[in-house]
Amino acid sequence: MVSPFILVNLKTYKEGMGSNAHRIAAAAETVARESGAVIGIAPAFTELHPMSHHYAIPVFAQHIDAITPGAHTGHILPEAVRSAGARGTLINHSERRLTLADIGACVEAARRLHLESVVCTNNDATSAAAAALKPDYVAIEPPELIGSGVSVSKADPGIIERSVNAVRAVNPDVKVLTGAGIQSGECVRIAVDLGTCGVLLASSVVKAENPEAVLRDLVSLI
Ligand code: G3P
C-alpha cells in the first residue's frame, strides 16, 4: 500500500492547544519518521507559526478567507497563513461552512500562494462540485459521524466509494481523503482500499490519553 496522508485536525479542542499541540506534533513527527507515513496537523491559527517552525511535518490552517491584504478586521488572510509556515489549508470544513463561490475563491487564493487545498464535503454531489474547482484534495466527511466515535470507513463505506467515483469523473487529478470517526489502522486501510489517499481525523488522536499510541495504530497496516 502506498503511504497514506494522515491529517490530524486539532480543531479548538483544549487537548489540542499550547503544550498539548506540541505533544501531538512531536508524536506525529516521530511516528511519521519511523513509519514512512506522511502525518500532518491542522492546529489553531495561533499555533501555525510554532508548529511549522518546531516540527518537520506538514502544517495546515483550518480555514482561510478569500481576502487580499487590506482592511478586513477579524479575517484570516491567506498570505498570513503562508508566511506563518503553513503548507496548506482546509476549506469548507463542516464546522466552518462556506458558499460555493467562497470555496472557489479560497481554492484560487490557495493556488496563488502555493498552499495545498483540502476542500471538505458532506456527500458525493458536493464532492463532485468541489472537484470541479480543482483543489489538491477533496475530504469526504459525513457530518453525522464527525466526532461520533463511529468510523465512516466501517459505517458508510458506500459514501467513500461514491465520492471517489464522483471526483474521478470530474477531475482524476484531485486526490480524496476520508474523514469522520477514523480511529485505527483498519479504518485507514479500508479508506485506502476504497481509493482514497488518506484520512482527515481529529478526536481519536487529539482526545487520546496517548496520542502517539493512536498514531502508531493508524499507520500499523500501511
Ligand atoms: O476534520 C476532521 C473531522 O471533522 C473528523 O473529526 O473527530 O470524527 O475524527 P473526528
Image: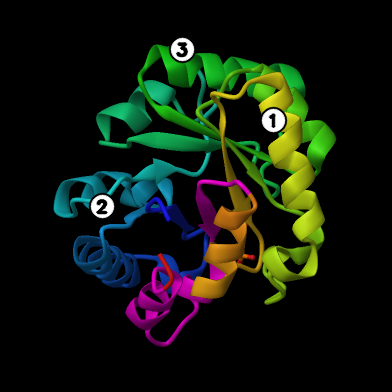
Alpha carbons under labels 1 and 3: distance apart? 29 Å
The residue shown at (51%, 67%) is 13
Residue 142 sits in which quadrant? Answer: bottom right
Q: How many marks?
A: 3
Q: Which residue is mark 3?
A: 68
Q: Position of residue 195 (x, y in %)?
A: 61, 46
* Element carrying mark 2: helix
Residue type of the residue flagged with mark 1: Val
| Mark 3 closeness class: few <14, some 14–19, many ≥20 residues within 10 Å | few
Q: Which residue is mark 2?
A: 51
* Element carrying mark 3: loop
Q: Is residue 87 above or below residue 161?
A: above
Q: Quadrant of the C terminus?
A: bottom left
The residue shown at (45%, 71%) is 218
* Element carrying mark 1: helix
Residues rendered magenta in the picture = 195-220
Q: Which residue is mark 1?
A: 167
Numbered tag placed on residue 218 in the rendering: none
Residue type of the residue flagged with mark 3: Thr
Alpha carbons under labels 3 and 2: distance apart? 24 Å
Q: Residue furthest bottom?
A: 209
> In terms of sequence position, does the residue under pointer 1 or pointer 3 come before the other?
3
Residue type of the residue flagged with mark 2: Met
On the question of residue 97 being in view, the answer is no
Magenta-colored stretch includes residue 221 = no
Alpha carbons under labels 2 and 1: distance apart? 31 Å
Residue 157 sits in which quadrant? Answer: bottom right
> In terms of sequence position, does the residue under pointer 2 or pointer 1 come before the other?
2
Q: Position of residue 221 (x, y in %)?
A: 43, 71
Magenta-colored stretch includes residue 198 = yes
The answer to whether residue 113 is left or right of residue 160 is left
